[in-house]
Amino acid sequence: MIDVREDVIFVVRLDGRCEPLTLEQLAHQITEHPTIGKIELWVARQIAHAVMHYFHTDLDRDVVDEAALNEVLERVLACCCEVIDSDKPAAFSADLRKLAVQAGYGFELVFFKELEKTVRDLSGHPARFIQFTGLRPCVKLLTGRKNWSSSCSRLENEILDFLRNKVGNESSGKESLLVVR
């Protein structure tokens, strides 16, 4: 089997054609979407990345039909509209950098234990919007790096996977929007 790039999915159009759709193309589609209104390109890229990740990782699919893609986009954009239009902070918010400072330099296991406690607090919280901030500073603190490196990327991916899995498990079936910055 040929590995497909993470930033590309193949879409089977309604007329039967199969076309590649890149992350950038999807981001531009999102900026032009009628239900979301005016949205900055960097936000659209994050939404597109989340949708691509969902198909590649969660569903293990590189080829999707246009109807499935549109359905997922509509659901994601409906949640995003509420967050983007709201001036209020996320219903549940935590600072990853602060957790890393509490854990101490290089203590990844302590950090993940504290992060797990923080995510467990979600189970009793009615939040639909869950926000974690300070990811890059957190990673640099835990790795002890001033400049970004491959070990930083590895840890960043570990933290993101951890959050996706734990938040998905703790949300007890309710739909929620996870934002990590």
Image: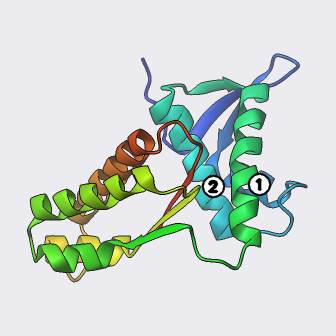
Label drawn at residue 30: 1
Dots 2, 1 in contact, CB < 8 A: yes
Say which quadrant the N terminus sits in.
top left
Label drawn at residue 47: 2
| Displayed quadrant of residue 126 | bottom right
Give the CA separation, mark 2 to mark 1. Answer: 8 Å
Residue 8, visible in the rendered structure? yes
Tag 1: residue type? Ile
Indicate the position of residue 93 as horizontal and vertical percent values: 46, 70
**On screen, residue 13 above or below 47:** above
Q: Is residue 41 left or right of residue 109?
A: right
Tag 2: residue type? Ile
Q: Is residue 71 left or right of residue 163?
A: right
Indicate the position of residue 35 as horizontal and vertical percent values: 87, 55
Indicate the position of residue 54 as horizontal and vertical percent values: 54, 38
What residue appears at the point 36 percent right and 58 percent down from the top-left corner? 121
Q: Secondary structure at mark 2?
A: helix
What residue appears at the point 32 percent right and 53 percent down from the top-left corner? 120
Indicate the position of residue 45 as horizontal and vertical percent values: 63, 60
Is the residue marked by circle 2 packed among few (<14), some (14-19), or many (20+) residues within 10 Å? many
Q: Secondary structure at mark 1?
A: helix
Residue most extreme to the front: 124
What residue appears at the point 59 percent right and 55 percent down from the top-left corner? 128
